[in-house]
Amino acid sequence: MRSIVLANQKGGVGKTTTAIHLAHGFAIAGRRVLLMDLDPQGNATVAVQGMLPEDTPTDAPREWMIPVAERLWLLPSAGGEAVSSGEATIDTERLQAVVAELEGEIDVLIVDCPPRMDEWGWAGVQLCEEVIVPVQAEFFSMHGLSQMMASLEEAAQRYPGKGRLRGVLPTMVDAKEEVSGEILEDLRRNLKEVVLNTVIFRDSSLVEAASHGQSVFIHSPWSKGALCYTELVQEIIDG
Ligand SMILES: Nc1ncnc2c1ncn2[C@@H]1O[C@H](COP(=O)(O)OP(=O)(O)OP(=O)(O)O)[C@@H](O)[C@H]1O
Ligand SMILES: [Mg+2]
């Protein structure tokens, strides 16, 4: 099972949007996917609520996995608590055991984290082999990125086999704003190949899709947002 967590302690950088579209993108590409919402805010849980069409098969490997689309299931925000401890605290070992049981039944685990590296954020990193750090292409997002990278390096040592940085993903890049392009150049100059090739451009279709509880692949399949996330899924599938 491949496991990928979206993490960045900065809020509003596109973690949830990326989690949803990686999850649905992998499912469209034929993988069986579990999207785990580890953010008590539950944004990912809400953002896929409108997806379940009436004829979607509802069989799931486990009763707590909510079917969202073909080959895509959700462990909702409150579900994380229920599965791990039944309380609003997290039992990482229990979650790890639950994920281990899904080996062979799920091909890809995608985990959405809160905008803090608290016990929930670290649980996501401990569950996953790969970490993608979405970074909004604006000045303030650069602050804290080096701290985030240092914490991840520490985590990779502390949790062997987990928390390897797969890449930094530039998000909400605005082609019309010069400063957005400059920040992207800076990122690539400083972090080099750590920065993913795919760039997620700013596109209001992504906001609209979320407000309808759907992924952009359903809501506006020919939008820029859909194209960007299709490219990201391909880059991550390729290695
Ligand atoms: N590429 C984009 N273009 C336009 N809007 C976007 C894009 N990506 C995300 N958004 C919007 O920006 C807001 C923040 O995105 P998102 O919720 O994915 O960030 P987050 O990092 O998960 O936030 P939080 O830290 O609060 O969990 C949302 O309203 C989302 O719809
Ligand atoms: Mg979020």
Image (cartoon, rainbow, N blue to C red):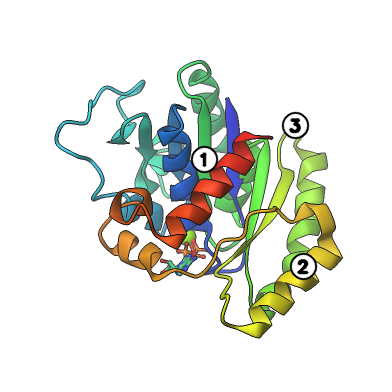
In the rendered image of this protein, does residue 68 appear above or below residue 18? Answer: above
At which x and y percent is residue 71? 37, 29
Give the percent coordinates (x, y) of residue 95: 52, 33
How far apart, in angstroms, are the residues tagged by discs 1 and 2?
25 Å
Label 3 SS: loop
Mark 1 belongs to which amino acid?
Answer: Ile
Mark 3 sits on what residue?
161
Other residues around mark 1 within 10 Å, as few (<14) / some (14–19) / many (≥20): many
| Residue type at numbered disc 2 | Leu
Q: Residue at x 52, y 44 (%)?
A: 111
Task: Mark yes or no: residue 16 visible.
Answer: yes
Per the rendering, the mark at residue 110 is 1
At 54% from the left and 66% from the top, the residue drawn is 201
Percent coordinates x, y for residue 46 in the rendering:
31, 55
Q: Are marks 2 and 3 in contact (CB under 8 Å)?
A: no
**Which mark is in front, 2 or 3?**
2
Q: Quadrant of residue 188?
A: bottom right
The amino acid type of the residue labelled 3 equals Gly
Q: Which residue is mark 2?
A: 187
